[in-house]
């Protein structure tokens, strides 16, 4: 899946880079402002821009950038 890096997607990638998107036990993803981001983060996952990091026993799993996602974000910052 190929995506265009829209401002909304880039903002979500930045939130992922800062560790602000978590996944709950029901499989839904949320940002630090308590907005549900499940469909948007799944779109980025399908594009290969993000992946779910391992959870520790006391914390929810956090989404992280893949190399491809880091590249997309870096390209947007430098352009």
Image: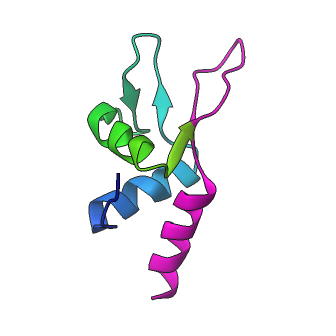
**Can you say whether 17 is above or below 61 in the image?**
below
Query: Can residue 70 be found in the magenta stretch?
Result: yes
In the image as oriented, which residue stretches furthest toward the bottom? 79
- Within the image, what quadrant is residue 13 found in? bottom left
Residue 39 percent across, percent down from the top left? 27, 35
Residue 11 screen position, x and y as percent: 38, 60
Please state the horizontal and vertical placement of residue 69, each as a whole percent of the image: 52, 58
Residue 60: quadrant of the picture: top right
Residue 49 lies, in percent from the top left, at 49, 52
Vertical placement of residue 41 versus 77, above or below: above
Confirm whether the magenta stretch covers residue 10.
no
Q: Measuring 39% from the left and 63% from the top, which residue is drawn there?
A: 10
Stretch of the chain drawn in magenta: 52-79
- Left or right side of 22 for 6: left
Q: Residue at x 52, y 86 (%)?
A: 78
Of the 4 image quadrants, the one containing the C terminus is bottom left
Horizontal relation, residue 75 to residue 67: left or right: left
Q: Residue at x 47, y 51 (%)?
A: 15
């Amino acid at each position: 899946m190929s995506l265009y890096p829209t401002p909304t997607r880039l903002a979500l990638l930045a939130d992922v880079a800062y560790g602000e998107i978590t996944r709950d036990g029901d499989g839904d993803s949320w940002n630090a402002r308590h907005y549900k981001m499940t469909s948007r983060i799944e779109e980025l996952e399908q594009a290969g821009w993000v992946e779910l990091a391992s959870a520790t026993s006391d914390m929810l799993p956090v989404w992280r950038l893949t190399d491809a996602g880091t590249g997309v974000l870096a390209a947007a910052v430098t352009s």
